[in-house]
Image: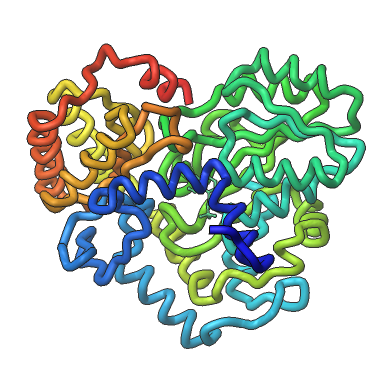
Amino acid sequence: MTATSPIEKLGQALRQQTLVRIIEQFGAEHPDSHLKDLVIDEAGPGRAIVVNGRRVINFGSDSFLGLDQDPRVQEAVRRGLQRWGTHNGSSRAFASVRANIEAERKLAEWLGVESVLILPSVMLANLGAIPGLVGRQDAIALDEQAHSSMQEAAKIARANGTKVATFAHSDPGALERTLAGLRPYRCGLVCLDGVYSMSGRIPPMVELNTVARAGDAVLYIDDAHGTGVLGNQGRGTVLEALGSYDNTFVVGSLSKAFSCAGGFIGCPEPFHRLLKIRCAPYVFGGPVVPSYLEAVGTVIDILRSDEYPALRARLDAAIGRLTRGLTELGLVVMGGATPIVSVLVGDESKTLDAGKFLFDRGYYVQSVLFPAVPYHAGVLRIQCNANHDAAAIEGLVHAFSALARTLALPGPAGSSPAAALDRR
Ligand SMILES: Cc1ncc(COP(=O)(O)O)c(C=O)c1O
């Protein structure tokens, strides 16, 4: 059908776009097994959710420590609501509630950085801070597998005149060559993830930092998946690997293990003020809802308490039980260093069918397809939480066993797409 109005033409043009075509095609070919855009009608107790009238155990939540269901965290949100109302209705460039300042102070103290700036999400933190930190005379070197938020941020920086180039994933030699190729520049910013959520791999930060320093560049590490769940007291991967934040901006999430809302940038003190001025989402957008900021301090108290090792041990037990069970089934299991464990399926249709098979048996895991993973390297991505009990994990492994008997799944020898995924 020929489009007539400008808005119809726009819609028609968008439907021709490659990503839209791929996603729409998967949806059309697999109306029953697609399991995307799900609507959750009930959440809890524990990790139970009700979707499409079916109660399933949710293995697709980033609330790794299960703190979204913790009465103390919920009470803090209620307290914040009573104290601050539903929203403070202003950009932070004008005013911040005291809870925001307190949350930043506590985060900085816990993390061991001089200062922290909170934004409504990690996506917005990256979109604001990366172009905000550099200018026309500067350069960005971006890991080819850095999170999409940093890829998009680099596009904004490039449009502002900053030189941008990517380097081969987690390869210090490639970073050195990329920085050399970007010369001349005043300052460089090297953007990478603290932990790559598709593979669970942690980059060689010491080596990357050595190269960055030698090349007049600062590391910018998005540790969204490490925050609260990796490292001593859940401080993440950066301090654990580098021992200090001397040459690093570190970004963390308040929406994953923290189970609150938002993202933050840890930085040296002077950058707190500089980022407030240069970070467009900070100036031109709204803040995290105050009630969630009240809960950030409660979560930090838990992370710094004697309870944290027990919480981590429960999570580790769940991850261990799951990876052992899946490996014993002869499946290709990736991850284990973080609470994200992926099982290779391969073919896109088969990955969707496999996700539906598990869903029908009471377990929701995410079917992840190209372009989030390489073509024909579809995976079932399982997020372990500390409040998944042994019965839930064993039940999921049992469902995988039935799946492996129904659908031929790749074995440990793997295929080349699996090897490609493992490199991500
Ligand atoms: C590395 C990384 N950065 C950023 C994000 C986005 O975080 P947010 O939901 O806070 O925008 C994610 C989400 O999964 C992520 O894995």
Image side of residue 155 versus residue 100, left or right: right
Q: x and y percent of residue 191 in the render?
A: 67, 35
User: Which of the pair 397/19 is nearer the observer?
Assistant: 19
Image side of residue 384 versus residue 176, left or right: left
Residue at image location 68% in from the left, 31% down from the top = 142
Residue at image location 33% in from the left, 34% down from the top = 348
Residue at image location 14% in from the left, 36% down from the top = 400
Whether 227 is drawn above or below 349: the answer is below
Q: x and y percent of residue 184 in the render?
A: 91, 24
Residue at image location 43% in from the left, 75% down from the top = 77
Res. 2 image quadrant: bottom right
Res. 179 image quadrant: top right
Q: How many numbered tags mark residues here?
A: 0
User: Which of the pair 307/208 is nearer the observer?
Assistant: 208
Q: x and y percent of residue 57 in the render?
A: 19, 55
Res. 164 image quadrant: top right
Q: x and y percent of residue 175 in the render?
A: 69, 20
Query: Residue 310, can we see it?
Result: no
